Each structure stands twice: as structure tokens, then as C-alpha cells.
Image (spheres, rainbow, N blue to C red):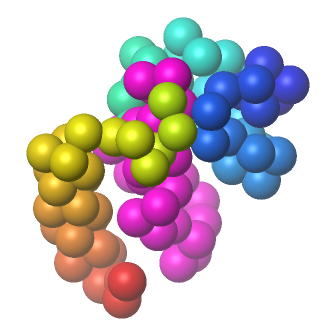
Amino acid sequence: MKELTTLPNIGKTLAEKLVMIGVTNEMQLKEMGSENAIIKISTIENNGICINMLYALEGAIQGIRWHNLDKSRKQELLEFFHQLANTKNKKC
């Protein structure tokens, strides 16, 4: 878990969630991708996901703060998140 918290945007709480889905290092997170990671987290967290978490995961994968994500990538992630939320009947 310590390795995960060295990544941008990944604090203790998000690192714990990643470990719960089997991600323990940067390479595993990159291989899984932000979309798959948020899907897996949503299966263990009842209403415990939000768009900022998805942005944080993508930023960690890219090695940047999520605020600096490309606008088009943020839009893609937002559309993905809305589809995920609608599928799971979550209000965001």
C-alpha cells in the first residue's frame, strides 16, 4: 500500500480500496486502467465512488494531479462514469 500512496492523487483511503480489489502497485493499476479499477471498487463500495475518484485514478496512472488531466480525457471519463452510475442506479 505504501507504494500506491506515492502516486499522485492516491491517499490512504483510495490505496486501501485499491488493495481490496487486488491492486498493490503502480504497474497493476496501469494494467487495470482507471475505468476497470472504478468498476471493481464500485462492487465493494456501496455508493462509495465518485467522479473525482475516477479522475484521481486516471491522474495516478498518468503520473499527474487529476486537475491537470486533458479536457477531452476528463470528458471521456465523465461520460463513462455517468454510464456506470446509471447502470448501478447510483445518483451522482
Q: Position of residue 17 (x, y in %)?
A: 68, 48
Given the current orientation, which residue lies at the most extreme top position?
27
Residue 37 is left or right of residue 24, and the answer is: left
Where are the magenta residues, as a range?
35-63
Q: How many numbered marks appear?
A: 0
Instruction: Name the residue at the bottom extreme.
Output: 91
Apparent side of residue 4 relative to residue 92 in the rendered image (left or right): right
Residue 7 lies, with reference to residue 54, above or below; the image says above
Determine whether, in the image, residue 17 is placed left or right of residue 58. Answer: right
Residue in the picture at 40% in, 64% down: 51
Q: Is residue 27 above or below residue 51?
A: above
In the image: residue 34, left or right of residue 77:
right
Residue 82 makes an appearance in the image: yes
Give the overall secondary structure of the magenta segment: helix
Give the percent coordinates (x, y) of residue 72. 13, 45
The image quarter containing residue 9 is: top right
